[in-house]
Image (spheres, grey):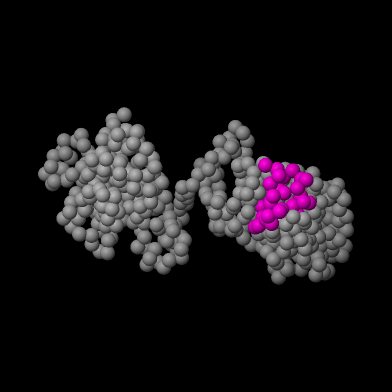
Amino acid sequence: MASKKIQSALISVYYKDNLEPIIALLKQHGVKIYSTGGTQKFIEDQDAEVIPVEELTGYPSIFGGRVKTLHPKIFGGILHRREHEGDVSQTTEFDIPAIDLVIVDLYPFEETVASGASEADTIEKIDIGGISLIRAAAKNFKDVVIIASKAQYGELEEKLKTQSGATTLEDRRYFATQAFQVSSHYDTHIFKYFNQTEDIKALKISENKAKTLRYGENPHQAAHFFGDLNEMFDQLNGKELSYNNLVDIDAAVALIAEFKGETAFAILKHTNACGVAIAPTVKEAYQKAFAADTTSAFGGVLVTNQTVDLAAAETMNSLFFEVLIAPSFENDALELLKSKKNRILLLQKIAAPGTKLVKTLLNGFIEQDKDLKTETIADFKVMTKVAPSDEEKKALVFAAKICKHTKSNTIVLSNSNQLFASGVGQTSRVDALKQAIEKAGSFGFDLKGAVMASDAFFPFPDCVEIAHGAGINAVVQPGGSIKDKDSIDYCDAYGMSMVMTGVRHFKH
């Protein structure tokens, strides 16, 4: 495998954590070390001999450290081909020593952006020498080992130990691949920083953290999650999250975020809410949400925006559910809920970040803004002779929030604090309404005085006719049909109220 003994190394790193064992091994194998600034002092403190880069290049570090390693003797030492007669001849001619190992990392650009630093400070964290060294060493992996992150220190240490200070071509190719991942990730975040103001149409996504999932939507599909779940959640109990769990959790946290300042509870199945309620306590909100569909709640994902106390935990503990998400848990409630070892309990620490949605499609990707528009009473335009009452307006806002997070075509039926039923993912709006009415009846809800929300306009008056027959008095919809007037006229003829928002909420 073209094993090569490491005889010389260039080390220049920002993070020096866990570098000591590598220095000790290089010293043990008689490796000549070149270094710069703080790294040089760190290595000297390990009682290892170091040749300053300035001594090799004949130039000091200049421009406040912006230029240290950018020199032909450094890059020639890395890039020259050891088996190329012309390259070797030139190393002799220009007194360029071979460099077999490069250990370098990059200034913390992402962390600096996240800290809210000024533009001037952020720009200074764009690494030039480091990224150039990484690319040069990775390009010449046939002869050079590149370690581009402290995350790889342990792997290098193991190779040095088990292979007596040598590496194989397979090792070097592996480290080069890691290096190009580091450099591409770094450049992606720099581009995204600059593109906040320039808005160049390019899709750049890079995520270093990867988690292998048990499987995808189905057992025959492999799947991974790319991202930092620990940033959003502390998992307090249960088995590993699955692909379907994550999809439902995403839908759950998006829905519950609509109910700021209220004690809300939702139960979701296959990303659609089968129960939603607001109440004075989490226990009561859960009970009302559960009552909306006691069948679908089995195996569902539960979410609340308030602390789960013992009273709530005792009430929901008998239900088999996959996941419960909450911002906090009282200790006694947590202990009770942990009695089911596979039950996933998530403490949500932050809201889902980001304003964009990306999806693979055909031979490319589609990107769109997240649907962050939520209508309030102020957004309602009364279209009928009869205006909704204050209580009906509250109910219409409640129903519209749920409708926004439900698969199209959808109809939602509710009062001001409880989902009665919804018709989800239907190919016709009439079918969605009929499904919702039948479901509400099957769970004992009287729809007299209920309200109806639709995610898109009514192309015909049939939906308001059916709703009126079920006892529904008030309707919210976006409007925009060329036949809006037909639905409005029907409402006027039968004393129903209708408001329009001008905002469609398709969710495909």
Residue 361 horizontal/vertical position (percent): 55, 44
| Residue at image location 38% in from the left, 40% down from the top | 155
Question: Can residue 465 be spotted in the picture?
Answer: no
Residue 376 against residue 288 in the figure, above or below: below
Q: In which quarter of the image is residue 191?
A: bottom left
Residue 219 against residue 210 in the figure, above or below: above
In the rendered structure, the answer to whether residue 21 lies left or right of residue 32 reads right
Q: Quadrant of the N terminus?
A: top left
| Residue at image location 20% in from the left, 55% down from the top | 54
Q: Which of 287 and 266 is in front in this view?
A: 287
Q: Nearer the viewer, residue 391 or 20?
A: 20
Q: Which of 155 and 228 is in front in this view?
A: 155
Residue 228 against residue 400 in the figure, above or below: above
Number of numbered discs overlaid on the protein picture: 0
In the rendered structure, the answer to whether residue 164 lies left or right of residue 311 reads left
Residue 457 horizontal/vertical position (percent): 72, 57
In the rendered structure, the answer to whether residue 162 lies left or right of residue 29 reads right
Instruction: Report the residue that reaches farthest toward the top.
Output: 1
| Residue at image location 39% in from the left, 42% down from the top | 154
Q: What stretch is highlighted in magenta?
A: 312-341
| Residue at image location 31% in from the left, 55% down from the top | 128
Residue 42 horizontal/vertical position (percent): 30, 54
Would you say residue 326 sits in the magenta stretch? yes
Question: Can residue 213 be spotted in the picture?
Answer: yes
Would you say residue 369 sits in the magenta stretch? no
Residue 502 horizontal/vertical position (percent): 68, 63
In the rendered structure, the answer to whether residue 62 lies left or right of residue 435 reads left
